[in-house]
Each structure stands twice: as C-alpha cells, then as structure tokens.
Amino acid sequence: MQREYATISHDSDHRRFADYISQYDDLFARVDQREWFRLYVRGLLIAPERKNVEAIAAALTRFKSGVNLGQALQHFVTDSPWDHKGVLVRYRETLLSDLREAPATWVVHDGVLLKKGRNSVGTQRQLARSIGRKVNCQVAVVVGLAGDFGYVPLAVRLYLPSYWLREFPELAARTVPESWRAPTPKAAIALSLLDELREEGWNAPAAAADEGYVTADGFAEALAERGVRLTESTAEPLAAAGERFEWLKARLGLDHFEGRTWAGWHHHAAMVFAAAGFLSGEPEPWA
C-alpha cells in the first residue's frame, strides 16, 4: 500500500505547522535564517501552482510584510550559508518512529528534472531513463525505502555529468563548490548516500535499482560488501519511487527552482523534503 500524504488547499492550521517546523530550529545559527526557512517551507506548502521564489513570495504576503520577500527568499535559498544536509538528516529523523524498524527495501533511482537552456547547474541533453530518451535536464540521484508503507525518499544529490564539467569549466567554477566538482558516476553517488543513511541507522537487506545502476561496474559488488543484495523484484518499488518523485515535483515544486547554483538547488531540495515530511505526518488535509 502506498504511504499516504495529506494534501492542503491553504494554510489554516498554524499550530500543527509551527510544531513540526520548530524541530529544525537548532540547525540555524541566526534567528533570521530560522524565519526564512519557516517561510520558504510554508510557501512550498501553500503556493497554488509554481513553487519558484516569486510565487512563494506572493503566497506569503499575508505572513510577512515590510520587506522585499522575493529578494530575501532568493538570498536565503541561493546565498545564505546553511547546511542542507543537516535539514535532510532532521527530515529523516521525523520519520523514525514510523519507518526505522519497518521491513523495507532500498530503492536507488534517477530523478529527472526537465530544464530549458544550459545555465542551470548540471543541465545538459542526457539520457532520462524514466522517459526513455535523451532530454535537456538535470538528473538527481535519489535513495529511499519501499515496503508495506509504500515508498519514502530519504536522500538526494544532484548529478554533474562529466561532459558538463569538461565543457563548461567556467560555469562550474561559478556555480559549484570546488569540493563537489570532481566527476562522480551516479552509482558512486548512490553508494555514498547509502553509506550516510546506514551510518544514521537506516538498514535494509536488499535494494531495487534503476538499470543504469545495476549495470554500473562494481555496483552490485559494492552493495554486497555492505550486506545488501540486488533484488530482481524491482517493478513495484521503482514504480512507487517514480510516482513519489513526480509528486515531489508536482505538489511541492522540486523542479520549480530557477536558481543556477549547486548550493541553491540543494537548499531548495532540502526544503522540499522538509515540506514532504510535514505532509507525511498529517492524518487529514488542512481545511
């Protein structure tokens, strides 16, 4: 059974949201960062269609006045120095009581984000396996868990194609921190994410993976070294993962971010996951 996520039409339950989002407060050194984080996540939940900065700012005007909301939110998501990985860790901690002990299977898959132009970090014409052809897009590596609860995404990282890094070195230098600029295959990214999750105590005996990971040199062996076997029953968990990724795009705007930097993309993605964490804990829609 697919894990159910509530939907909301507008923000009328301030207390429930405040209780949930306060769990992230200690991750931010400054009060203003804490406030912009709360506002951005709220905006992801209540903006009616697009979830870019402009639309989020428009949806938040009744909660914050006297400042240029769009400019402030753009700075927060693109330039403010806060750790997106800490937000993702906290998001996962909010799911612990439901999922830590549940029988599950790892799911490793691509997340395709269609893009126009070539100015967004990691964007080029590349194979999108979920679509079955080459398209102009960004590709994220996603690792989650599937079980009787459905599928829950746990970790995400943007893939930087070797061609993009080689052909656009000046753009890469402007948009990607040096520590992330080394060409890294998607399978290696997936293993790195898996290791981070395992260090936090997440475990599963088997993994379902997209074909591109299954056929990558050494991937199956690396999983085996971690006590994880590749399962042949991939259709259901991969379908659930694909459906949930599309939901993250359509409901919470994972692919709506219009900034062009590595940090901005991962900040936005982390806040999308935080918003998803709130909805996953809601027993019924906000009225």
Image (tube, rainbow, N blue to C red):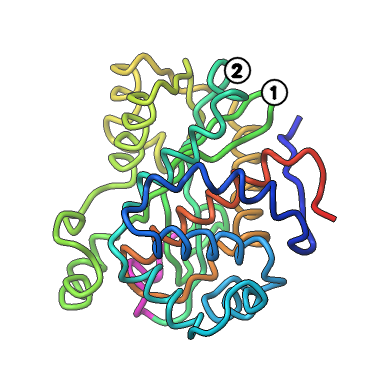
Q: Residue at x 78, y 38 (%)?
A: 283
Q: Position of residue 123 (x, y in %)?
A: 37, 70
Tag in front: 1 or 2: 2
Name the residue type under label 2.
Answer: Ala
Magenta residue check for 126: yes
Above/below status of 130 relative to 80: above
Q: Badge 1 local density, few (<14 within 10 Å), some, or many (20+)? A: few
**Residue 19 or residue 223, whichever sits in front:** 19
| Whole-percent x, y for residue 154 in the image | 49, 38
- Give, as a three-letter code, the residue at label 1: Asp
* Span shown in magenta: 118-127
Front in this rendered view, residue 152 or 205: 152
Most common SS among magenta residues:
loop
Describe the element under mark 2 as helix, strand or loop.
loop
Q: Position of residue 81 (x, y in %)?
A: 28, 62
In the drawing, does residue 150 fall left or right of residue 119? right
Residue position for label 2: 102
Q: Residue 148 bears which disc, if any? A: 1
Q: Residue at x 51, y 30 (%)?
A: 208
Q: Earlier in the sequence, mark 1 or mark 2?
A: 2
Q: Secondary structure at mark 1?
A: loop
Q: Is residue 152 magenta?
A: no
Q: Tell me if label 1 and label 2 are in contact, CB under 8 Å.
A: yes
Residue beneath the point at 52% across and 76% down: 53
